[in-house]
Image (cartoon, rainbow, N blue to C red):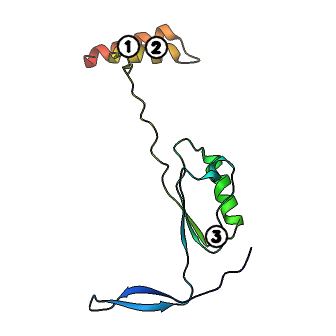
C-alpha cells in the first residue's frame, strides 16, 4: 500500500462564545462507509481504508459470523477504528394469523405440574394440592 501524503485540513470548532472558527488540523482521518450493497459482503475486495474511520452497515441477512469476518478483514487493512451500525432493514414478513397459546385455568396448570413431578406419589400429591386449591377457591 502506498503511503499517503499528509495535508493540513481546515476543520471547524466552536469558541466559548459559540462562534464557529476554522483551524488547521494536521492529521485528518477519512470517513468511509461500507454499506449493505458493497461487494465485501460477498467476499469481494475491501476499499483502501488504511488509517480511516470505517462505518460498517451490514445487510439484513448478514450473520454474526459474516459481520465478524468482514470486521476482521477491515482491521487487518489497518483502519483507525470501525463503527458497526445496525443491520439494514429487511423485508417485513406478513403473518396471516398468529397461533395463540391455549388459555388454561389455574387448576389445569397445577394438575399438569403435579403429573410432571418426579419421585412422588402423584395421586397423593393431587389430593393434597386439590384440597388446598378448593380452600382458596381456585
Q: Secondary structure at mark 1?
A: helix
Between residue 120 and residue 59, name the one nearer to us: 59
Q: Is residue 35 left or right of residue 45?
A: left
Q: Is residue 17 left or right of residue 104?
A: left
Among the two numbered marks 2 and 3 on one chain, the one whose residue lies closer to the N terminus: 3
In three-dimensional space, the C-alpha distance between marks 3 and 1, rounded to whole angstroms, equals: 60 Å
Depth check, mark 2 against mark 3: the one in front is 3
Among the two numbered marks 2 and 1 on one chain, the one whose residue lies closer to the N terminus: 1
In three-dimensional space, the C-alpha distance between marks 2 and 1, rounded to whole angstroms, equals: 15 Å
Instruction: Please state the horizontal and vertical placement of residue 59, each as a whole percent of the image.
Output: 54, 47
Q: Which residue is mark 1?
A: 108
Instruction: Please state the horizontal and vertical placement of residue 135, each as a whole percent of the image.
Output: 27, 16
Q: Secondary structure at mark 2?
A: helix
Instruction: Please state the horizontal and vertical placement of residue 57, each as a whole percent of the image.
Output: 52, 55
Q: Is residue 91 left or right of residue 106?
A: right
Q: Which residue is mark 2?
A: 125
Depth check, mark 3 against mark 1: the one in front is 3
Q: Which residue is located at x 66 percent, y 67 percent?
A: 48
Instruction: Find the residue positioned furthest to the top.
Output: 123
Compared to residue 15, the image places residue 126 above or below, namely above
Q: Quadrant of residue 74?
A: bottom right
Q: Quadrant of residue 133?
A: top left
Q: Which residue is mark 3?
A: 79
Disc 2 residue crowd, few under 14, some 14–19, many 20+, Cα 10 Å: some
Between residue 65 and residue 126, name the one nearer to us: 65
In three-dimensional space, the C-alpha distance between marks 2 and 3, rounded to whole angstroms, equals: 66 Å
Disc 3 residue crowd, few under 14, some 14–19, many 20+, Cα 10 Å: some
Q: Secondary structure at mark 3?
A: loop
Amino acid at each position: 500500500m502506498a503511503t499517503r501524503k499528509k495535508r493540513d485540513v481546515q476543520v471547524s470548532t466552536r469558541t466559548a462564545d459559540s462562534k464557529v472558527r476554522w483551524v488547521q488540523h494536521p492529521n485528518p482521518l477519512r470517513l468511509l462507509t461500507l454499506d449493505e450493497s458493497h461487494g465485501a459482503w460477498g467476499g469481494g475486495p475491501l476499499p483502501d481504508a488504511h488509517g480511516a474511520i470505517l462505518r460498517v452497515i451490514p445487510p439484513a441477512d448478514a450473520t454474526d459470523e459474516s459481520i465478524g469476518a468482514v470486521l476482521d478483514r477491515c482491521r487487518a487493512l489497518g483502519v483507525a477504528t470501525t463503527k458497526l451500525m445496525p443491520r439494514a432493514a429487511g423485508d417485513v414478513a406478513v403473518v396471516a394469523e398468529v397461533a395463540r397459546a391455549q388459555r388454561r385455568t389455574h387448576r389445569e396448570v397445577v394438575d399438569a405440574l403435579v403429573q410432571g413431578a418426579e419421585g412422588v406419589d402423584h395421586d397423593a400429591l393431587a389430593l393434597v394440592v386439590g384440597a388446598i386449591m378448593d380452600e382458596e377457591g381456585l
